[in-house]
Image (cartoon, helix red, strand yellow):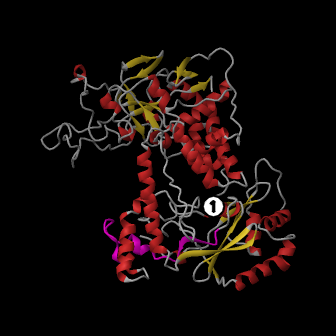
Amino acid sequence: MSIGLNKASPRPGYLLLRDGHAIPLSGISPDEIKAGAKRRVLHPEKEPIQHRLTLNAIVNCLGFKGDFGSFLSKGWPDFQDFLKRNRCTHRVQVFPVDNGGCTDLYFSGGTGPSPRDLADRLFEAQLPAPQRVFLGYGVNWAAWDQGNGYDTPAAAIASLTVGAESARQRAENLFTQRHQLMGQWGFLDDKLIDGPVRHIVDKTYWAPGFDPEERKTHYASTTAAVVAFRAVFDPQPEGWVDILRYSDRLMILRGHDGGWDILWRNYREKEPPQPSSLGHSYHLAIEDLPSRLMTQNDLHRRIHFRQGVWEEHEAHEAEQAFYDRGGNIQARQLNSSVDVRGAWLREQGTLPVLERVRWSGDIPPGFRVTLVEGRKVAMSELITVGSFRRMLIETGYAERRSDNQEPWERANDGEPDDSPAGATWVDSQAFCAWFERQLGVALRLPTRGELRSLRSAYSHHYDSLAKRGFPWEEYPPRPLATDQREEEGREVPSAVIWSEPRFIEPSVDVPELPPQSGVTSKSRKRWIDDFPPRATWKNPLPWAQYQGLTFIDAWDAYEWCQEWEWISGRFWEGQIGSTSWGAYKNAKVSFRVVMDLEV
């Protein structure tokens, strides 16, 4: 349920100085500026800046004349006079925040308009600056989130100031169309700008081949939903804020009750990405980050520090370009927003094309040159327990390995050195970081597409299971049953022996297989007393050759993909936790590495 936005604390943000150093600011009073200067985040490629110079740079980037001393004597008093003249009485948070917006209307902290969106529209868009915008400040959003999710909440109808019948019609019209608003908020167009709604950008992205009439229909429904939203909130004083220009680098946002907030040019909502924060997000120390992940961090930083750009507009163009190139929803789920935008910026010539050191000599032992998705790569066989143990000894990774990962020993103790290593996605990335230092060239895991192109799904039946929930968690797999009669009745091969049984034996109370509907209150899954149990490979393993590389063809054997948390196997592909080697999914996951030979 939502809370009143009036109760939200003032919003902190980051100011980028002209040299890229980032200053955390909760406000622009002298004390707040001093506090921000002390906690400045230095740009790694720029010269450090002294505290006094930082104070001068902050007030200059906020649009005040002179140095910090001038700000104390004149700039700050003049700013306070400006607030008084414009009836700005108290500092507030005017943007939606977590638990401080509307879930049902997609107008909350994560889905509503953001400070960066508005700041870029005001300072970077090279369009007339709006005088008044809707940010939801002071709206009783809790009234809209009450109810059963199907009927328009009575409290929402009662909160409107128009006549009773008009309030009911407007609220019901909006509530029935609310799902069209998902992902639409921002300042690319007139959706949230006071005045006639003449220009609407549909922030829905379409792959080539969609029927143009379907796109027109979707645009019309999105437009109708926006019009319904504005019909509800246009007559209300709450929610709207006036834009008061203080300088070409500082704007004041004034609500209906005199509450005010601020936005500055080069506003950032978060601290610049750091290698340590990237490693933390992946449960890896900096020394265990392979170059591919470090490059991703560099891209995050480069995009974060770019100034003078309209981010929302660039992101919108980049999203559509992704689909124009032939991308689909499944592929988009495997690419971060920064990766999508980075690819588009390189196409525009705004960012340089990445150049990595490439292997120029004989292919190292254990690798095989193969063609995947039109590119030549060198791909290794499955990394062995012996190789992984060597990495553990030489790097000390075992001491840095986070405690929340499934114990590596449970998947590998007792296994011979030449058997495939069971590992988490995090483990496999740490191995890449070590191995590429041995070879002097960047390494990565295979992508989902590469693995599937080398080894297709067993059948149409199992290909249809891809990207769905793990099919073997509640019951062991059925015998193979596909649209090809000759496959019916064959058992799905297994590759793993568990120290504790994973499934309860069938009985009168526990059926051997789930009902055809798939809806059941019982399963054969057995809860493990000592989790995770040990998992050893069967001997012999169901090996198979694909394009000269060796794979394990079994329902409980998988390989890690470069995409975060994604595993690929002969009978299923999908996502599991990056800190698991598969134990909680009744599986064991190994990995191989890739050396790029061609772009």
Dot 1, how many residues are within 10 Å of its Cα: few (below 14), some (14-19), or many (20+)?
Answer: many
Give residue 460's quadrant in the image: top left
From which residue to which does the magenta span run? 130-155
Image quarter (top left, top right, bottom left or bottom right) of the N terminus: bottom left
State the image coordinates of residue 172 (x, y, percent, origin top left): 35, 70
**Element at label 1:** helix
Residue under circle 1?
116
Q: Is residue 437 or residue 386 the one in the foreground?
A: 437
Q: Which residue is found at the position 57% from the left and 50% from the top?
A: 316
Q: Is residue 449 or residue 276 the one in the foreground?
A: 449
Q: Which residue is found at the position 42% from the left and 30% from the top?
A: 558
Image quarter (top left, top right, bottom left or bottom right) of the C terminus: top right
Q: Is residue 514 or residue 60 the one in the foreground?
A: 60
Q: Which residue is found at the position 71% from the left and 60% from the top?
A: 266
On the rendered structure, is 333 left or right of 517?
right
Residue 470, relative to residue 272: is it above or below? above
State the image coordinates of residue 87 (x, y, percent, origin top left): 66, 85
Residue type, mark 1 in image: Arg
Q: Is residue 290 visible?
A: no
Magenta stretch: residue 221 in it? no
Give residue 150's quadrant in the image: bottom left
